[in-house]
């Protein structure tokens, strides 16, 4: 019987250090079946990677020079028979001797949506990475995404001949949301676990909360926007809270155990993000048994069945969905006859 050649797994994740991408990377590295030979990781998460005992690691600084040096090092070190998992969503710049699999989880790289609202440096980086993905697509033998809609978007961008496989994964089994967990007091009507990036749509969410307040309805809301990384949106939230006496608490960025506790202390999750590849908080909240109010977009129904949906571009639609959920729907307009209309004209 022929013996299958040994394959070394190389993980290339030079800019994964926070958010859902980091949560998924941690879950992958915790797998007992992972045979990790080498890793190229973001130095901003070095403290975590140092806890892993297996594999040889190289750390990448958040600079163009460091990224390019890492690409050259990757090209030099990868040998025939190696399997390279590009976890950051981009193929290698240089063709590699091994087999390359790209895990694409950033939908912004795949869609052609406007980048208005992003800081200038971020906008330039995303434009370059969009070009990078298309220009080097032939350097990968396989692409993996998490949802059907993401697969369709990626094929539309790279061509129908590209091998795209749908393999959603997450580590939810260890969550303390289980039925045996100690009960937690409900402190918030809604929570929204998200960064402060423009596509997370906090501005329209807060505008919806203003509309609710003007109608005498003030549901409580928990947010997780880091004030250091997102000072503008944090300031906008703080000013709205003060001016309209909104019942909103912004906890800043939370570690995963605290996020689970926040789910358990909430009555529902609201999710107005306009673009996601997966929407990990949707799965986490569903795992915790929370009702979900979310944007009526493909990425949502790829993974969960929301109890209420809304147009994420309309604060009015978001507010109405909240009112429906709390059983305080907005009254519909009375329709008058043409004669009544004329009476109004001549009044």
Image: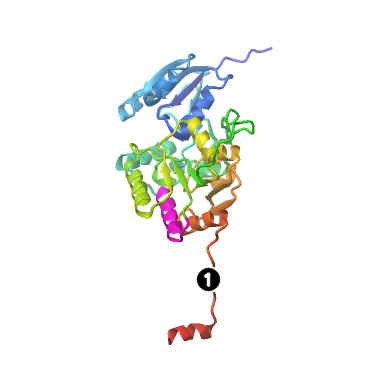
Q: Residue at x 51, y 47 (%)?
A: 189
Q: Please name whichever residue, 9 or 41, is drawn nearer the observer in this view of the structure.
A: 41
- Residue lying at 46% horizontally and 53% vertically, measured from the top left: 218
Q: Position of residue 194 (x, y in %)?
A: 45, 40
Specify the quadrant that holds the N terminus. Answer: top right
Which secondary structure is most common in the magenta stretch? helix
Identify the image quadrant of the C terminus. bottom left
258 to 338, vertically: above or below: above
Percent of width and height locating residue 132: 40, 36
11 over 144 or under it: above or below: above
Q: Is residue 205 magenta?
A: yes
Q: Is residue 116 visible?
A: no
Q: Residue furthest front?
A: 185
Residue 77 occupies which quadrant of the picture? top left
Residue 101 is situated, as x and y percent measured from the top left of the image, at 51, 29
The residues colored magenta run: 201-217
Q: Is residue 91 one of those drawn in magenta? A: no
The residue singled out by tag 1 in the image is 333
Residue at left offset 40%, top offset 30%: 15
Frontmost residue, 147 versus 141? 147
Judged from this view, the residue extending furthest toward the right is 1
Going by the image, does 3 lie left or right of 61? right
Q: Residues within 10 Å of mark 1 (few under 14, many from 20)?
A: few
Please determine whether, in this image, residue 216 is positioned above or below residue 106: below
Which quadrant of the structure image shows residue 172?
top right
């Amino acid at each position: 019987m022929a013996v299958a050649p040994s394959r070394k797994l190389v993980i290339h994740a030079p800019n994964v250090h926070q958010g859902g991408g980091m949560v998924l990377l941690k879950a992958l590295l915790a797998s007992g079946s992972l045979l990790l030979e080498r890793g190229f990781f973001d130095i901003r998460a070095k403290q975590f990677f140092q806890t892993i005992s297996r594999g040889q690691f190289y750390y990448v600084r958040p600079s163009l020079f460091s990224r390019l040096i890492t690409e050259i090092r990757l090209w030099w070190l990868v040998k025939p028979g190696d399997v390279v998992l590009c976890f950051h969503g981009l193929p290698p710049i240089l063709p590699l001797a091994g087999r390359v699999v790209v895990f694409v989880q950033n939908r912004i790289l795949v869609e052609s949506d406007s980048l208005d609202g992003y800081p200038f440096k971020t906008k330039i980086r995303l434009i370059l990475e969009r070009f990078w993905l298309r220009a080097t697509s032939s350097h990968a033998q396989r692409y993996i995404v998490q949802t059907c809609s993401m697969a369709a978007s990626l094929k539309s961008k790279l061509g129908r001949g590209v091998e795209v496989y749908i393999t959603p994964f997450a580590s939810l089994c260890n969550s303390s949301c289980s039925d045996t967990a100690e009960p937690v007091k409900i402190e918030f009507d809604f929570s929204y676990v998200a960064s402060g990036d423009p596509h997370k749509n906090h501005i329209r969410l807060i505008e919806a909360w203003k509309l609710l307040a003007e109608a005498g309805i003030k549901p409580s809301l928990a947010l997780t926007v880091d004030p250091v990384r997102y000072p503008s949106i944090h300031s906008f939230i703080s000013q709205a809270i003060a001016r309209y006496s909104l019942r909103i608490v912004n906890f800043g960025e939370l570690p995963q155990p605290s996020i689970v506790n926040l789910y358990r202390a909430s009555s529902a999750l609201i999710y107005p993000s306009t673009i996601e590849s997966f929407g990990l908080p949707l799965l986490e909240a569903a795992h915790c048994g929370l009702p979900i109010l979310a944007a009526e977009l493909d990425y949502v129904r790829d993974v969960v069945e929301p109890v209420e949906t809304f147009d994420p571009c309309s604060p009015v639609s978001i507010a109405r969905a909240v009112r429906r959920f709390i059983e305080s729907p907005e009254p519909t307009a009375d329709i008058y006859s043409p004669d009544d209309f004329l009476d109004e004209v001549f009044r």
